[in-house]
Image: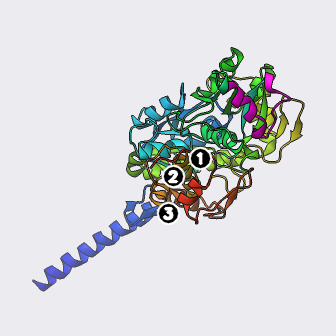
Amino acid sequence: MNKMTNTISRRQLIRQSAKALSAGALLAGLPKGWVGTAYADDSPERADMKFGMIALTDCSSIVIAHEKGLFKKYGINSTVAKGASWAAIRDSLSNDDIQATHMLLGMPIASTMGLGGAPKKPMIVPWILNRNGQSITLKKDLAGKVADDPKALKPLVDAAKASGTPMTFAMTFPPGTHAMWLRYWLAAGGVNPGDASGGGADISLITIPPPQMVANMKVGKMDGFCVGEPWNARSIAEEIGFTAINTQGIWKDHPEKVCAFTEEFANKNPKTVKAVLKALQESSAWLDKMENREEQAKIVSAATYINCPPETILGRLQGKYVMGDGRKFRDPNYMIFNDRNCNYPQPKYAKWWLTQLRRWGFTEGAPDYEGVAKQVMRTDIYEEAMKEMGYAHGGLSETPETFFDGKAFDPKADLEAYAASFDVKSLKA
């Protein structure tokens, strides 16, 4: 009996050794992600992704990642869809018609909180697409009367209001970046742009999609607008407007557009989101090489994207600013996509936005500054994705930011006090 048992044991040992040898030979040629006999799969949970964008130069990171095959490199089968308006983009993201999008920084904040007419839909920002590069354009008739100082606009605004025909200014979405730059600039000159509902306004503040700005100014529907490029440059090319001030002149290296996802999508597809960020890192680094900007302008100028002559796009991408009223200069703070820790989703930017939403009556009482900033600005996702691809970023910043009017924003200070510190404001309760 013992002899038979020993024979069976030897046979089992031989079979086990053969299996181990076979498995070892098989595993030897497999990626490092394999642990034992289980593969640690880092491929996207959802390979097919539709990206939203609006016809603005700062959609470039998404377009280049698509056109250069960088999304494909990280396992994403991408398509890019141009939206008709920011509201349409928001709704498409909320409905999962698109899974990620080019978006104004203020929009994910407003959607997460259910502000500005948006249904409450939590959204996240793990990536800032660009900084700088927007402008405030005024109609040609104001050239020589107003330049970059909004105080020069105040008497004109007052006269128009007294006559019963207030001046009209346009932005692209109420809680968005262009709205906040325009509000900040006007208020610094003593002009009240009104609360979230237009109450107390010295002017009429309207919403116009970016590609329609020039056409609306051409037919006399507005006195000024704030928008991204190339529409400010286009207004000068068509001789209907001039640039009063560039937004980097209001706040140097300000955050602008973001790549946004719904919180629900990101929770269900974490590897997909990180794959998108890795592709965007490569496209953004490519964009910030000045020798690539001519090619960038040609690619994004296509009818499927911006639908504008590449030469209209290129000049301001290179920092060459012809303002349309005789001023010309090279601006070192032109639009960037990757430099100077551009892409890190700093929570302090959301906090500043919340102070402005509070300032202009979008919120009733104090918002949850810390909680909303943490929920929306997903530094954890950004850091994980960059660590996986070996990219060394500049990390978290809580240094104060200084604006053109001399006011400083300290994200570690009393945010309610900051919101209430402005002479022109519309605080609610």
**Residue 266 at x, y percent in the picture:** 43, 49
What kind of residue is marked 1? Ala
Left or right relative to 321: residue 58 = left
Q: Which of the 4 image quarters holds residue 318?
A: top right
Image x and y of residue 337, in percent: 69, 46
x then y, percent, for residue 227:
66, 33
The reply to whether residue 144 is visible in this rendering is yes
List the single residue furthest toward the bottom: 2
Residue 413 is covered by the magenta coloring: no
Checking the image for residue 2, the label placed there is none
- Magenta segment, which residues? 140-160
Q: Give percent across and percent down for residue 106.
A: 54, 44
Residue nearest the observer in this picture, 348 or 309: 348
Front position among marks 3 and 2: 2
The residue wearing badge 3 is: 32
Q: Which residue is denoted by mark 2 in the rendering?
A: 274
